[in-house]
Image (cartoon, rainbow, N blue to C red):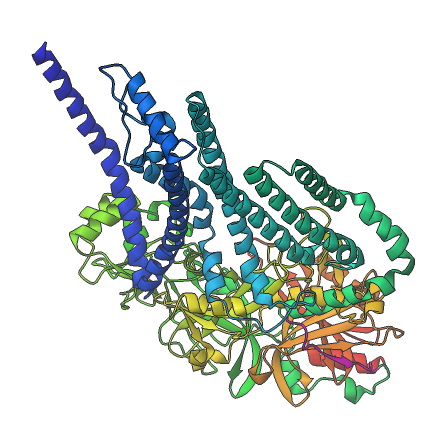
Amino acid sequence: MGKKTHARRFWLLGLGVLLVLLVLVPALAAFYADTLVEFWWYQSLGLGFYFWQRLLYSYLIFGSATALFFAFFYYNFITASRLLRVRPLGSTKFVLRLRRKFKRAAPRNALVITDQAGALRDPRKGRRSWGWLIIGSRRFSVLASLILALFVAYPLYHHWESALLFLFAPPAGIADPVYGLDISLYLFGLPLFRTIVYEFLLALGILLIILSVVYYLQLRTLTKRHLFLPPGVRRHLSVIMMLIFLVAILELLIQRYLLLYRDSNTPLFFGPGYTDMTVVLPLIWASVMALIMLGTAVVFYINQRSGRLLVLISVLFFVATIGLRQWDELAQTVQDFVVEPDELARQEPYIRNNIDATLNAFDLTEVETRPYVAVVDAGPSNTEPGELELRNIPVWDRDMLIDVYRELQELRTYYRFPQVNSDRYTIAGEYQQVFVAARELDFDRLPPDSRNWVNRWFKYTHGYGAVMSPAAQVGEDTKKWFLKDIPPQSDVGVTLEQSAIYFGMQDLYDVIAPNALREISYPGKDGVVLDDYSSERGIPIYNWFRRAIFALYYRDYKLFFTQAIIPESKILIRRNVPSTIEVVTPFLELDSDPYLVITPKRLFWIVDAYTLSDLYPYAEPVNRGLGTDPDSSMVSPIDKEFNYIRNSVKIVVDAYNGDMTYYLADPNDPIARAYQRMYPGLIKEMDAFPAALRAHIRYPRDLFVTQMQVYAKYHQTDPGAFYGQEDRWMFPSVSREGQVQTLLPYYVTLNLIDPARFEHLLLAPMNPEGRENMRAIGLVSSDGDNYGRIMVYSFPTGALIHGPSQIDALIDQDSDIAEQFTLWGRGGAEIHRGKLILIMVNGVITYVQPVYLKSAGNVAIPQLKRVIVSQNGKVAMEPSLEAAFAALSRKE
């Protein structure tokens, strides 16, 4: 029997070891590999300290909260254990008589065991009663306290960043209009306070339940022995009850601040109104008073066993206040009989609060408005643009230009232009608008037999070069290039020393570079030109330990055995720029249009990042109506609901080595400042922004779209005008190829802010809501000291200024244009009309629309064939802008 038992134990032990080897060890190894590679990657970016900060911050907050709740539970359990060392009530003599009585009544072989404090123990088992064992065991108290603390503190593990933001946040310097508190307390404190309140309510509720059960069971045991719980038990429970009522009162007080986010008055305005502040707010205070009365009555009753009537009255008072708050009829009655008969007068101060807060939240308080006097009857000399204006009218549409780039400049199947960006450069001494695109690698476009393991890891590692072309072009002339071909060539002095693109907008595979096989750089005259990656950035992979880790990380044993890795080899991972930034700084919202900048040394990506919040008091959120009725609310290209936004951070990424640098673009933003304090060294000051890139900073389009959507409603700063909403604006819409398209802001380089200075601008035509005529033009500058300067040209409400859709209709109705389109269509060509661009030429509203032709064959390269120009309701189409303006002059 002994041998069989020994053999069974041996086999069970062996099975356990095998299970550990097969399951536990690989799981730990995989976790270890993932964590180690993650650290190496952060370290390769120079962000190793930041990696540990984010990791340790979360555990620090969670650990601190756990320690606090552990101390709370443990202290109460120890207090309860001391109270459960029960003494009989009465005098000391009575206690001694009771002890002697128990000793006489005990059997000869039984013992009455007491401790030094006189606690009675079970004479049969020599132990205290079971209630004592639940609380009185120090080990049990520690274990129970730890488990409960982990359970209660766990939600804070997911809110650790909110806690740190509150600690590091600077004051915003703006007070809310109702309570006079700094806006920072709402942006950072409100979500944290609510979480803490819920955590403490949960902890106190759990503790009260445990103590009540233990004390009740102990009371039952003692009652059978004619003993009672000591007075300290009631005091202990009273303290817990008082704390619960205090925390509940804090929750009610926080609800006062939540009133500032009420939407009960929408669509008229956002935030609390007359009914909220004169009915709901007093009821909250009444609930606070009722809760104070109820807490006092309950504690008094627990200790004195009297005052039931006071408890009942307090309960009824509290229930009544809560019921009245939840009773919609009360608020509706006030609204119907007090507010609506004189609504504007009642709601005026609250409407003003909403207007001021929303303009502040979306950074629209400094918008300049200029009344625009439209020039309707101008002479020919005043309606034709000068040479600089002609050079900067973007007749090429970026959506159409991408097809031209792909057909003429990709050159190899494995290259790809993911996007085209608008920018401005000084070319041959002239400041002008251009389009730029990066020629990136697309490994999946290689022939199937070339998409092998070696090519994927070692040969096809990067894209090469960029192209640049002017935004303007004379009608049927050949396409002009400022930078083209491989290697990059320029006839206008644009130089580029390092053309390789290892990091870009494509979803690039991880690669190893440099390597023994050498990398394909670009196709040359005498065959493929090979190159080697030569930066210190990247994760070294040469030694066998790192190879093993990466082989485990990728589940690819070939990485361990390959001979292509050399001592200088590095593995480059996460090479998609936007997704990489999202991994490093998930607290920033990225603009949807990163753009390429060409410098004489190399290529860089600039990415605009936003800080968002939905906690700005009294400010109306955007995107609130998405998914229900988008027309009922303001919308934004950013796919989140928020009521505060700042373009606070600009990120520069080296396209060659992935070096990533953050710069603080808006030092007045408290959210960005808080993150800068939390992570020292991560976000640099804007003074350190590279000089070669500073001239190419531009105002982000997503932000301006959002701001103009908000301003379309909130430019009506007078409460009376806002109440009527008679002058609400909207982005114009045009019908294009059977689809209705919204004309969103676009980049132009014109002298619309300062007549003596051409600037890179975002321009947004605005129509009156529900109408097709033009009402205003919004502008924002991207250049120099004027960066971020928003200006709105407002047209007279009684004058007819043609809007884009009306001009579109005039073009459709023009017989000469229709005849030419019909002629082209008979030849099988596809006719595409580009975006309708609005500009101002010497004060005259001017529309420009390019016309492209595509052949009907397999290779369809868009060709700029004509340019349509419209002024004062007249339309002309010619091969060039000069000819079109001249044709308009002849129609005068």
Image: 621 above or below 877 = above
Residue located 54% across and 71% down the image: 171
Residue 403 visible? The answer is no
Viewer-side residue, 600 vs 99: 99
Report the magenta stretch's main SS. Answer: loop
Residue 427 picture location, percent across and down? 51, 83
Q: Residue at x 55, y 86 (%)?
A: 430
Image position, residue 11 (x, y; %): 15, 20
Which residue is located at x 31 percent, y 62 percent? 48
- Within the magenta stretch, is there residue 369? yes
User: Going by the picture, which residue comes out furthest to the right?
Assistant: 341
Figure label count: 0
Residue 233, above or below 809: above
Q: In the shown orientation, is residue 883 left or right of residue 220?
A: right
Report the front residue among 611 and 351: 351
Q: In the drawing, does residue 379 fall left or right of residue 785?
A: right
Picture layout, residue 431 above or below residue 442: below
Q: Nearer the viewer, residue 88 or 254?
A: 88
Give, as a single range, the part of the protein colored magenta. 362-375
Residue 317 position (above or below residue 867) = above
Residue 227 screen position, x and y as percent? 43, 27
**Residue 524 on image: x %, y %:** 34, 67
Quadrant the C terminus occupies: bottom right
The quarter of the picture where residue 706 lies is: bottom right
Q: Residue furthest top?
A: 1
Q: Relative to the observer, which residue lies in front, 747 or 649?
A: 649
